[in-house]
Image (cartoon, coloured by chain):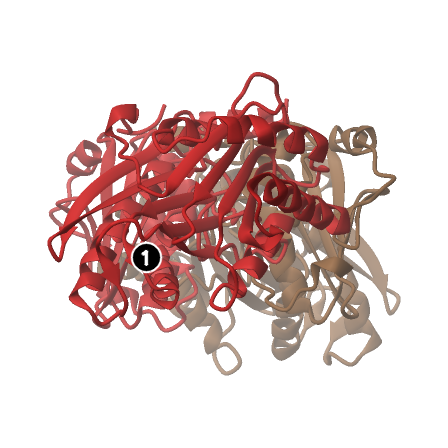
Chain colours: A red, B brown
Amino acid sequence: MAVNLPLPIPENLKPVAGVALGHAEAGIRKANRKDVLVVKLAPSATVAGVFTKNRFCAAPVQLCKEHLGNLRDGAPIRALVINTGNANAGTGESGLAHAKQTCAELATLLDCAPTQILPFSTGVILEPLPIDRLVAGLPQAIGNLNEDNWHNAALAIMTTDTQPKAASRQVVIDGHTVTLTGISKGAGMIKPNMATMLGFLATDARVAQPVLEQLTKAVADRSFNCITIDGDTSTNDSFIVMATGTSALAVESVDSPAYAALYDAVLGLSQELAQMIVRDGEGATKFITVTVEEGKDVEECRRIAYSIAHSPLVKTAFFASDPNLGRILAAIGYAGVDDLDVGKINLYLDDVWVARNGGRHPDYQEADGQRVMKQSEITIRVKLGRGQAGATIWTCDLSHEYVSINADYRS
Amino acid sequence: MAVNLPLPIPENLKPVAGVALGHAEAGIRKANRKDVLVVKLAPSATVAGVFTKNRFCAAPVQLCKEHLGNLRDGAPIRALVINTGNANAGTGESGLAHAKQTCAELATLLDCAPTQILPFSTGVILEPLPIDRLVAGLPQAIGNLNEDNWHNAALAIMTTDTQPKAASRQVVIDGHTVTLTGISKGAGMIKPNMATMLGFLATDARVAQPVLEQLTKAVADRSFNCITIDGDTSTNDSFIVMATGTSALAVESVDSPAYAALYDAVLGLSQELAQMIVRDGEGATKFITVTVEEGKDVEECRRIAYSIAHSPLVKTAFFASDPNLGRILAAIGYAGVDDLDVGKINLYLDDVWVARNGGRHPDYQEADGQRVMKQSEITIRVKLGRGQAGATIWTCDLSHEYVSINADYRS
């Protein structure tokens, strides 16, 4: 029951020259299901990523950080390998050994060094990775490597997602056509902290390594780091941007107009992919934008926005289309902004002015709140009356279906 | 579907000399329902309280703090008045005027000053208090004031509670028998920050005002401030301790043995009342104790305990009796303790050693986790391996019923 999330049309997903994708059914957790993806990159590609800040970060995340950390000096990344069905997190030393073995096996098949591989896992935590089945699936994935395989790639990284998430766009920068295509996955355990469950975005622009690193972090902070479904920051969040360098556009500096144009394009696509995750949030029936304005700094605006977005009471009220909006005030009040003057706060639901100066607006009619609450897309807007900063995050409601999905996930 | 929460037996609730309780059916929100309680105190009584830290604290909470703030110099508190059905929060200036009017009307009826009254409200936020109906109900409540009326008092303060919460005990201190009786309410919007939704505890001991203030805060921090149902800190949390001074025991100093004995008795009763709220948590099917040990300080232990207790994924796994315990590791990892070394963490479920040094214990069998998960009372124990501090909090699971209750609350 995704919220206004159309199925991707395979023909609309534009190939990015220098990116070939191959999938396999390796039986990691269940049989007859695409569960391994290999992404092979042209030697000219640069790659940057941001990862979960969860202290229990998964073994593959640890390896990714290590391999990307040496990238400015070393050999380029040649491939990514992603498995679903098992997160390889909370698995200790053996988990790390499994992740290394995965890189080594793929490196042998692709004739490169293990440090040129980035591994990713997603699925159940605290269970040993079935490394033999994963390794056995790699030749199958390599066998169908193809630049026109983005739709299958999106399918191969799904877990509790109800549908694949992928999008594409082309922009003209400095007279050169640049293609961007990305995929993402995730529906639960979603409150990315520096990244999301899994997001992969490729462009054929040529982007210098330090520039790509800066762009990736900046984009993540305004896209994948602005969504939440259940407030549970995953052990495996990863967002990766790949620039294959196969188009004629070269971006050498963050101060160039070309950087700004590419940034806008990457940000737009990343926000679309991130919002797809919220639209497909476990049990979601509403897509909710929470905007906090007039704050002293972005940090306090984000804190209040997340407080609203994580409140089970707010989320269930939205599920019920019940304008029980005092719950939003309560969530603002306990967000931890100690010197907040509630007498200056204004609250709007779309165009409806609900609370003025901290109390119910005298003209507010419940029928108006009810009208907005019944929509599938709703904006909560809070004005704090204490500064110029603002922040926006995207979330969904909390329904019976969320409980069902997460009470049944492993069965 | 409260968890191991027996109905209170009216005869077991011992009267506290100097505390008379009267209830009314005032039709605040619904007809034919006890919704107003007046508690009248002997002139010798001392009273102390702790209140929500929610910045949107309700109008009655603001007045309570004001009236208690002047207590060391001024006239004693003579009565409490509590209404359900409306929280009088997010109501701005008119809400404050209504709370003041409530105090004034009751003061006239009881022949004291308005500042000698403490007002409390609980119910829906952002709706005007029906002050006329509340005031009209006061004579009825005063008409049935009675020291043997604790059970009706517990009934009168219920909202989404499935049953009244009350308990009593007697202890002998310095050769004097001291009686303690208390009531509490709350089932949702429960993550008290300095206090709980509503908790009232009375004893006939004579306790000096500064001593009672210290005792109240110390007890709250180890009882009502250690529970969470949904992480939503209410706008109206209040915990009040009343000492009528009608027994022969006098407690003049926090350094006396009598203080220590009274503290133990008040703490024991407060923990019982606080745990009753969790046992009656909205939709609760499991009562879960989260203990975090070997931390650097209490603050980080509490932070990790709450992170576990608030995770929707952990809570739904417990609802399903599914030992998907990697979710607990993830919640520990994102709790925000930045220098946490996950390689030192041990996790136990009751007597079952689940994770050792950050990874799955080699001897851990899912059948053992399953056995514990099926119980109605479960202890999650986390050892951080980095210090001597510890903290315990109590919570419940997240079920379909929670969503149903909160999607239907106002209808």
State the residue in front, B169 or B281: B281
Look at the image and tell me whether residue B86 can be seen.
Answer: no
The chain under label 1 reads A
In this picture, residue B150 sits left or right of residue A262: right
Q: Residue at x 26, y 69 (%)?
A: A254
State the residue in front, B348 or A174: A174
**From the viewer's perspective, is residue B28 above or below residue B405?**
below
Look at the image and tell me whether residue A111 can be seen.
Answer: yes
State the residue in front, B335 or B91: B335
Query: Farthest residue toward the top?
Result: A32
Q: Quadrant of residue A44?
A: bottom left
How many marks the image carries: the answer is 1
**From the viewer's perspective, is residue A84 above or below residue A115?**
above
In this picture, residue A8 sits left or right of residue B6: left
**From the viewer's perspective, is residue B46 above or below residue A176?**
below
Q: Position of residue B144 (x, y in %)?
A: 51, 42
Query: Farthest residue toward the front?
Result: A111
User: The residue tagged with tag 1: helix, strand or loop?
Assistant: helix
Q: Quadrant of residue B203?
A: bottom right
Point out the image quarter for the N terminus of chain B: top right
Point out the image quarter for the C terminus of chain B: top left
Q: Quadrant of residue B10?
A: top right
Q: Position of residue A42 (x, y in %)?
A: 40, 47
In this picture, residue A331 sits left or right of residue B350: left
Q: Amino acid at mark 1?
A: Val
Q: Position of residue B202 (x, y in %)?
A: 64, 57
Q: Position of residue A47 (x, y in %)?
A: 42, 55
The residue labelled by disc 1 is A219
Counting other residues with Cα less than 10 Å from the Cα at mark 1, is it few (<14), some (14-19), or many (20 or more)?
many
State the residue in front, A282 or A134: A134
